[in-house]
Amino acid sequence: MRLGFTRFIKILFSSFFIQTSWSFFSMQGMGFLFTLVSGVEKNQRDKIRKTHKGFFNTHPYMSSYIIGATIRAYDEGKSSPDEIKRFITITQTSFASAGDILFWQTIRPALLLVATILSIKLGIIGPIIFIVVYNIFHLYHRIKGIKDGYNIGWDVIYLLKSKRFTTVQHIFEILGAFFSGLLFSLAALKINYLLLIPLTLLFTVLLIKRFWSVLIIITVILLLIIMVMV
């Protein structure tokens, strides 16, 4: 059975509501179940309701990869419910970690820095750019995740090593480092623009070398004090 455009849109639309029934007991379980049910044949829905009405928790944007692969497994009918549940248990943890690092710890902070700097200079343009750019990445994983999950199946977990995760993360780490230095330079009371180059380079080196975040924060505070005093 093919994914098809109509079914794809139905699954995509349902996936946006994966957190609407969030609870401490099942986390995103009800939303995940709702999305699976919306994407399979009617004769499979009762079996899915009995099998997947428990716990599920991953990064909401990354859930699309798991949803696509799970629906394909039910379409093929070659795997038992226990095997499918085992796949979901393994992948939800892996994609949760990857999504948290990529979005919460890398893309969102970097774009917030960019938006803040642009807001200082251009006003409302800053938040607008943040919303547009952030949602490009967000929607890309929502859409691409369903398609790749369905096309690749259980091997979708190996995409975590692909450039869409590793390269993008690395780029935004560097951007975050650069704009951190730029923001603190702009925020200094008595700015010495000659400090801008070494400051941004230091942030970049610290992130590339993967120093502890506490060390980076302490360095920021010390540099800010120095810049204010200069």
Image (tube, rainbow, N blue to C red):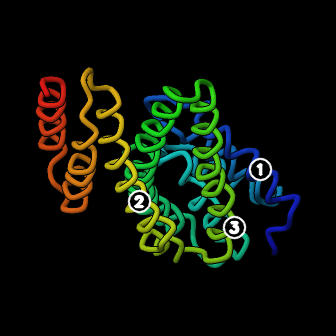
Asked if labels 3 and 2 touch by Cβ distance under 8 angstroms, the answer is no
Residue appearing at x 73%, y 71% in the figure: 75
Nearer to us: label 3 or label 1: 3
Asked if residue 184 lies left or right of residue 20, the reply is left
Figure quadrant of the N terminus? bottom right
Image quarter of residue 147: bottom right
Q: Which mark is residue 147?
A: 3
Residue appearing at x 66%, y 51% in the figure: 139
Residue appearing at x 47%, y 40% in the figure: 114
Three-letter code for the amino acid on which mark 2 is drawn: Gln
Structural crowding at the residue carrying mark 2, measured as other residues with C-alpha within 10 Å and reported as few (<14), some (14–19) or many (≥20)? some
Helix, strand or loop at label 1? It is: helix
Q: Is residue 12 above or below residue 20?
A: below
Q: Which mark is residue 169?
A: 2
Nearer to us: label 2 or label 3: 2
Image quarter of residue 94: bottom left
Three-letter code for the amino acid on which mark 1 is drawn: Ser
Mark earlier in primary sequence (2, 3): 3
Figure quadrant of the C terminus? top left
Residue 208: x and y in percent read 24, 61
Mark earlier in primary sequence (1, 2): 1
Q: CA distance from mark 2 to mark 3?
A: 22 Å
Helix, strand or loop at label 2? It is: helix
Outermost residue, top side: 189
Q: CA distance from mark 3 to mark 1?
A: 16 Å
Q: CA distance from mark 1 to mark 2?
A: 32 Å
Mark earlier in primary sequence (3, 1): 1
Three-letter code for the amino acid on which mark 3 is drawn: Lys
Total numbered circles? 3
Residue 87: x and y in percent read 48, 66
